[in-house]
Amino acid sequence: MGRNYLALSGGERQRVHLARVLAQLWPGDGERILLLDEPTSMLDPLHQHTTLKTVREFADRGAAVLVILHDLNLAARYCDRTLLLEAGRAHALDTPSQVLQPDSLKAVFGLDVLVQLHPERGHPLIIAR
């Protein structure tokens, strides 16, 4: 791109940070652990998915990855296990299909939702009512 880092948008900076971390860890030997807090914030939908696909590939190569996400549909699509917190305490921990249920989401967020299976991928798809 040839642009100064300070001239980048928030989303572009976020992608630069992730690239720097992955460049240091990937492929790497031994145990690799990646902790990400809202890695998709400030990103458009295309970059949200490309970022999480990259992180998913990193996990599939044996790294331990912990990702904090507020977008439940992204968590359902890319995560193996989901921890749903209620007031800072564990409400449910299991697969996205087990955790992302209407009753649990109502209890934690106070939001009525419809949960269906994604028509192509089979993961939960959360729709606010």
Image (tube, helix red, strand yellow):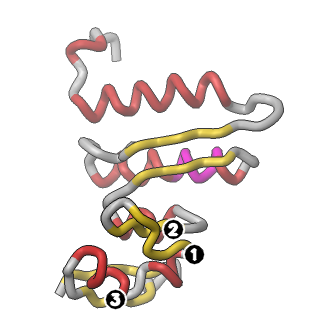
Q: Which residue is mark 3?
A: 102
Which residue is at a point 30% across and 76% down the rendered structure image?
A: 108
Mark drawn on residue 8: none
Q: What amino acid is found at the position of numbered circle 1 in the picture?
A: Asp
Q: Which residue is mark 1?
A: 94
Name the residue nearer the viewer: 8 or 103: 103
Q: Quadrant of the C terminus?
A: bottom left
Name the residue nearer the viewer: 97 or 13: 97
Verify whether residue 48 appears in magenta: no
Mark 3 or 2 closer to N-term?
2
Farthest residue, direction left: 129
Label 2 Cα crowd, 10 Å radius (few <14 / some 14-19 / many 20+)? many
Q: CA distance from mark 3 to mark 2?
A: 15 Å
Mark 2 or 1 closer to N-term?
2
Q: What amino acid is found at the position of numbered circle 2 in the picture?
A: Thr
The x, y position of residue 65, in whole percent, is: 60, 48
